[in-house]
Image: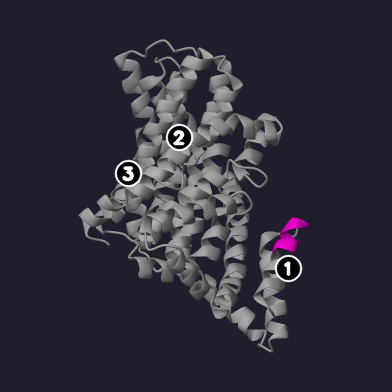
């Protein structure tokens, strides 16, 4: 079976609305049959793709975020951030970004950020009479920080199939995530002036202390995760297990907002959210095997070697490629499709797989805001009721700070690599 036909069937399946995992499985099965390969290989590759200790972290991080999101945790975090900076002009925009930075240390998912914390943020900004475009745009853009600051589900998937250290990737996401937040705050200032946004009454010092006390236990969870990995006391998977235990203690025993019935619902939601990811990973494993078997990675390497000898040009081309793919595919699919192709490219040009991982994931997060398949757009559609394309137009100005951040991280690798190198884990 020719590789061109293989990809033609893949893209045709996507265009007619076939689910992504089936779009990868259908051409893969046809390839195996037409090339007289045993279908046993299909089951073997799919199972091997899921047989990873690192991947266990995915349902754990999802469940921990679900537990923390089930009660008043998101409201406590938002109220604390509001007490700190809500009194500035357009202050709820800054609050939106700061709250997303804190919540990103719990969820590891942009969609979870937009769908959970985003509802609180949108409600508050509407009540304060903020411009709808500002409200929707900053909520969508700040949600992209979620998978950059650890923990990060896309980093776990990337680490599993690239050979990069999950801990190194988590640490590599800290400074880029903070940099993203700062750039988004600059955009908030611009939008606040443009839309003449209001300001809250400045919170008193006792009010700030009270808000901090209410949110402190929730904000400790990201420190436990990052601290455990930073000090080497826990692997990311072990840190995810600790996060669940901590989330259950805080929400169930201290805040008393978690009943057994609610816990069962959270477990079922975790299964519902985990299974699509795992099915895609299984399907992408055999798909990636065929791509490698056809030596597409070698062809791609030869193309870039003939094109340029500049690592920066390679990374800029990679950015363009992933930005286009992000318009059509979920981050997990992008990571699974590209990782086998990127490994020889990184070795030949002396690029860091950790640095590439941050670039690919940030690219894919920007894709969440781009139609036709921008998942954050559809989440905001369900939350606000606005048409997807209208939400996309409101998000368009916020692409500027995100792409600026992407270019800065691409041109200056130390933004990503400083902390991992300081810790000696790359």
Disc number placed over residue 175 in the picture, else none: 3
What residue sits 49% from the left and 75% below the top? 298
Give SS at disc 3.
helix
302 in relation to 97, above or below: below
Within 10 Å of disc 3 (Cα), the crowding (few <14, some 14-19, many 20+) is some
**Circles 2, 1 touching at the beta carbon (< 8 Å):** no
User: 319 or 191, which lies in front?
Assistant: 319
User: 124 or 146, which lies in front?
Assistant: 146
Q: Position of residue 84 (x, y in %)?
A: 36, 22
User: 155 or 239, which lies in front?
Assistant: 155
Report which residue position mark 1 lands on. 9
Q: Position of residue 344 (x, y in %)?
A: 42, 71
Report whether residue 181 is seen: yes
Residue 222 sits in which quadrant? top left
Give SS at disc 1.
helix
What residue sits 43% from the left and 68% below the top? 305
Q: Compare marks 2 and 1 and give the one earlier in the sequence.
A: 1
Q: Position of residue 142 (x, y in %)?
A: 48, 35
Q: Position of residue 44 (x, y in %)?
A: 58, 81
Residue 158 in the figure: left or right of residue 278: left
**Circles 3, 2 touching at the beta carbon (< 8 Å):** no
Is residue 373 within the magenta segment? no
Q: Compare marks 3 and 1 and give the one earlier in the sequence.
A: 1
Q: Which residues are magenta?
A: 11-16
Within 10 Å of disc 1 (Cα), the crowding (few <14, some 14-19, many 20+) is some
From mark 3 to mark 1, how far is it between C-alphas?
Answer: 41 Å
> Which label lies toward us, 3 or 1?
1
Disc number placed over residue 331 in the picture, else none: none
Disc number placed over residue 401 in the picture, else none: 2
Residue 409 in the figure: left or right of residue 335: left
Residue 165 sits in which quadrant? bottom left
């Amino acid at each position: 079976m020719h590789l061109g036909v293989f990809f033609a069937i893949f893209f045709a399946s996507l265009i007619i609305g076939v689910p992504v995992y089936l779009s990868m499985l259908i051409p893969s099965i046809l390839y195996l049959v037409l090339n007289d390969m045993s279908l046993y290989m299909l089951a073997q590759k799919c199972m091997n793709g899921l047989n990873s200790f690192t991947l266990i972290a995915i349902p754990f991080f999802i469940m921990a975020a679900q537990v923390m999101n089930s009660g008043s945790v998101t409201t406590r975090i938002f109220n604390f951030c509001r007490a700190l900076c809500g009194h500035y002009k357009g202050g709820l925009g800054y609050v939106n970004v700061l709250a997303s930075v804190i919540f990103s240390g719990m969820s590891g998912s942009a969609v979870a950020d937009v769908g959970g914390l985003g509802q609180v943020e949108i409600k508050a900004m509407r009540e304060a009479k903020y411009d709808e475009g500002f409200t929707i745009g900053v909520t969508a853009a700040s949600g992209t920080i979620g998978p950059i600051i650890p923990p990060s589900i896309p980093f776990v998937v990337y680490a599993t199939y690239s050979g990069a250290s999950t801990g190194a990737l988590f640490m590599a996401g800290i400074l880029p995530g903070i940099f993203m937040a700062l750039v988004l705050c600059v955009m908030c200032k611009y939008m606040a002036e443009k839309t003449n946004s209001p300001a809250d009454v400045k919170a008193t010092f006792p009010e700030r202390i009270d808000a901090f006390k209410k949110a402190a236990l929730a904000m400790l969870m990201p420190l436990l995760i990052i601290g455990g990995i930073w000090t080497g006391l826990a692997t990311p998977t072990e840190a995810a297990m600790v996060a669940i235990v901590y989330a259950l203690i805080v929400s169930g025993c201290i805040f008393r907002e978690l009943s057994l019935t609610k816990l069962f619902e959270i477990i079922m939601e975790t299964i519902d959210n985990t299974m699509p990811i795992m099915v895609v990973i299984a399907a992408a494993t055999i798909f990636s095997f065929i791509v490698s078997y056809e030596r597409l990675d070698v062809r791609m390497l030869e193309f870039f070697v003939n094109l340029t000898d500049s690592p920066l040009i390679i990374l800029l081309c990679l950015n363009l490629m992933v930005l286009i793919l992000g318009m059509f595919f979920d981050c997990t699919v992008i990571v699974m499709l590209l990782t086998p192709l990127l490994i020889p490219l990184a070795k030949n040009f002396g690029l860091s797989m950790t640095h590439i991982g941050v670039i690919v994931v940030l690219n894919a997060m920007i894709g969440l805001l781009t139609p036709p398949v921008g998942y954050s757009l559809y989440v905001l559609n369900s939350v606000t009721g606005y048409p997807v394309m209208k939400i996309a137009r409101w998000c368009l100005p916020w692409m500027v700070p995100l792409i600026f951040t992407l270019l800065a991280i691409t041109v200056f690798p130390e933004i990503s690599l400083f902390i991992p190198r300081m810790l000696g884990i790359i």
